[in-house]
Image (cartoon, rainbow, N blue to C red):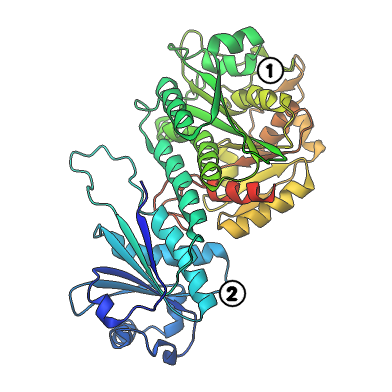
Amino acid sequence: MLPEVIENKQLINVKQMQGTSHVLMVLPRASKSEALEKIPYQDILRSALKRKRMQVDEMAKTPIATDLPHGGAAAWLMLDESVSRFEQYTVLRKGLSLLTGEQPREIVLAVFGDSKQRALAAELAVYVALINSAALPSRKQKPKTDHVKKIVVYGDESHDRHVNACATAEGNSLARELTMLPPNELTPTHYRARVKKLARSHGWKLEEYDFKRLKKMGAGAFVAVAQGSHEQDAAVVHLSYSPKGAKQRIALVGKGICFDTGGHNLKPAKYMQGMHEDMNGSAVALGILLAATRLKLKVGIDVWLAIAQNHIGPLAYKQNEVITALNGTTIEIVHTDAEGRMVLADTLNLAARAKPDAMIDFATLTGSMAVALGSRYSGIFSNREALITQAIAAGKRSGERVNAFPLDADYEPALDSKIADIKQCTMEGEADHILAARFLMRFIEERPWLHMDLSASSCEGGLGAVASNVTGFGVAWGVEMLRQF
């Protein structure tokens, strides 16, 4: 549950600050110390700046913390309207982190400047405070028991402006929570049960394509991966959100590999560590659906979750096998650790058969995307230029940055097979992020489609608005994309 948000239109004063223990002071960007006039305890801030040998405007990149006379703590920063949303979120997250280490139960957000500056500062600061107040999974004997219960805003009263922040933060928190759960707690069986519970709570229609049903249907690409798991509890789970008045339907497809050993091409320990997070794409799709439901967006949404594990065992698929996918495409298996594109192939084809107006899939798909971009951007591909334009704009507005990669046909010959319609991948791995996208294109029935390779799903030290290593990247971006539909 997210903290309660309480708003006060008046600016904070010294008396009110004396009743607080943790306050984030958000000032408008300025280059002169006169900008601090009429700011409570500005003498304390001036002294701190002098000790640190900082200029006033340096607080736009480097927040500072001070003690207050009554025993409370303040973090001070400047919000620069001229920089990107990502940079604004980053400085707010850094400022907030100066306070949250003490596990406060209440955080005060005090915003300053003219009415427009205060409105922007409050909107962004509330979102950052909400998203970093979520209770994330911990299995320590003495976990952190105190979480922020209340966020109090001084200097702006938005009425309903924070609805978007609350919904998006809730969706992001769900995505991070699921991604962080250990693999013995989020098996396909447990995951499917959790999704059913969410569907009941939020009124989503649910349909499951379990292992036996998929095998009978001829979904050989999905089944090839799933058959290596002794439990055979894998499934494609379909959720539907159908608000009145919706004129378009968008399909969100998520890779949900609950643990990836690499199969017969077993990963070394260094690269198997953290593979319980390989279901992040499905968690992002769920988080977007939750946020859209909370916001009552007037767009129909179908979410398709490819939930499975990539295990090694007597029945696990092997190199050199030829698999027939749901749409009849035959696939030569080259590497069993390229399982994500296999489960997505049949899941995308199921989604495409419903003829959505657009399809977006999310997957922690390739190591080559992480090599290309690192962990601060995610890469995107699309068969429609308009979707690329929308996606980049949504990244700028949401503070979740994306970079477009080529999808040209002259990459395709690398996937030519002598014994099947297409190779699953190449052994060399060159441009694998591009080849994976070209592979997935075979299964989308020419629908408008965008693929996100989630290289920013985890970033050491946090990213943008989010302070945890697991970022939930894609939820805020996805909400912005849905708004455009």
Q: Horizontal placement of 145 versus 278: left or right?
A: left
For marks 1 and 2, give the one nearer the viewer: 2
| Front-lying residue, 343 or 43 | 43
Could you tell me residue 441's position as x and y percent? 73, 31
> Which sits earlier in the primary sequence, circle 1 or circle 2?
2
Say whether marks 1 and 2 touch (CB < 8 Å).
no
Tell me the CA gap for discs 1 and 2.
51 Å
In the image, residue 249 sits, relative to residue 400, either above or below, namely above
Instruction: Look at 52% across and 16% down and name the residue there.
Output: 226
Residue type indicated by callout 2:
Ser
Q: Which residue is mark 1?
A: 332
Q: Horizontal placement of 429 versus 295: left or right?
A: right
Give the crowd class for mark 1: few <14, some 14-19, many >=20 residues within 10 Å. many
| Front-lying residue, 333 or 363 | 363
| Front-lying residue, 360 or 121 | 121
Q: Which residue is mark 2?
A: 82
